[in-house]
């Protein structure tokens, strides 16, 4: 009985009281439109009550889910993450990353000493590094403006 009167349960009850009638009203509205000649509304006429049933099933599952079960699943995920461990160092050595292949196709990085590998010209590497520096400077200037970018302030102006 206690699971029905918790704060979490009241939230789910309130959502159910809003969602199920809303879905049924939408289904009734679509039935009215379908009867008026809108052929596409026939699909929605049956879809909205299905959403209401899914809401009831979800509500039932969430009410009967014990917080201990949720905590146990979280702990299991954490245990698995610890077994895997943190990401290791970069598996591709730096010289290998700076090589392109001409025989195996684009997007494949060959290992050291493989056939068809050519080093990228130093000027291209320097140009890429300069472009990255400019972009990082731009990001730093945005941060220095002191105001976060939002939908209403897309430039991040103070």
Image: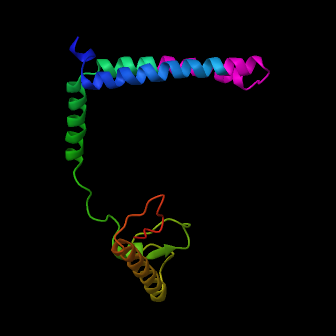
User: Does residue 79 sit above or below 156 in this rendering?
Assistant: above
User: Does residue 137 sit above or below 147 in this rendering?
Assistant: below
- Find residue 121 and report its horizontal and vertical position in percent: 48, 86
Where, by quadrant of the figure, is residue 139 drawn?
bottom left
Type of colouring:
rainbow
User: Does residue 86 sit above or below 129 in this rendering?
Assistant: above
In this rendering, would 3 be left or right of 23? left
- Find residue 25 and report its horizontal and vertical position in percent: 58, 19
Q: Main secondary structure of the magenta part?
A: helix
Residue at 34% in and 75% down: 144
- Find residue 148 and report its horizontal and vertical position in percent: 38, 64
Residue at 25% in and 25% down: 7
Residue at 53% in and 22% down: 22
Residue situated furthest bottom in the rendering: 123
Where, by quadrant of the figure, is residue 13 drawn?
top left
Magenta includes 52?
A: yes
In this rendering, would 107 be left or right of 80? right
Residue at 41% in and 25% down: 15
102 or 21, nearer to the observer: 21
130 or 115, nearer to the observer: 130
Residue situated furthest top in the rendering: 1
Magenta includes 39?
A: yes
Which part of the image, by quadrant, shows the N terminus?
top left
For the image, the number of numbered tags is: 0
In this rendering, would 140 be left or right of 150? left
- Find residue 10 and report its horizontal and vertical position in percent: 31, 22
Which part of the image, by quadrant, shows the C terminus?
bottom left
Q: Which stretch did the figure color magenta?
A: 30-54
Residue situated furthest right in the rendering: 37
In this rendering, would 135 be left or right of 6? right
């Amino acid at each position: 009985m206690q699971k029905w009167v918790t704060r979490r349960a009241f939230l789910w009850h309130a959502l159910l009281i809003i969602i199920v009638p809303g879905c049924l009203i939408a289904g009734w509205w679509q039935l009215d439109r379908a009867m008026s000649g809108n052929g596409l509304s026939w699909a929605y006429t049956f879809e909205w009550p299905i959403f209401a049933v899914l809401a009831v099933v979800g509500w039932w599952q969430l009410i009967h889910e014990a917080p201990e079960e949720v905590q146990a699943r979280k702990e299991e995920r954490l245990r698995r993450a610890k077994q895997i461990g943190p990401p290791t160092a970069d598996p591709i050595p730096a010289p290998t990353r700076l090589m392109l292949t001409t025989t195996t196709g684009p997007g494949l990085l060959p290992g050291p000493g493989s056939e068809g590998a050519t080093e990228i010209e130093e000027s291209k590497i320097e140009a890429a590094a300069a472009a990255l520096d400019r972009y990082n400077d731009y990001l730093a200037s945005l941060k220095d403006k002191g105001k976060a970018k939002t939908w209403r302030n897309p430039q991040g102006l103070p």
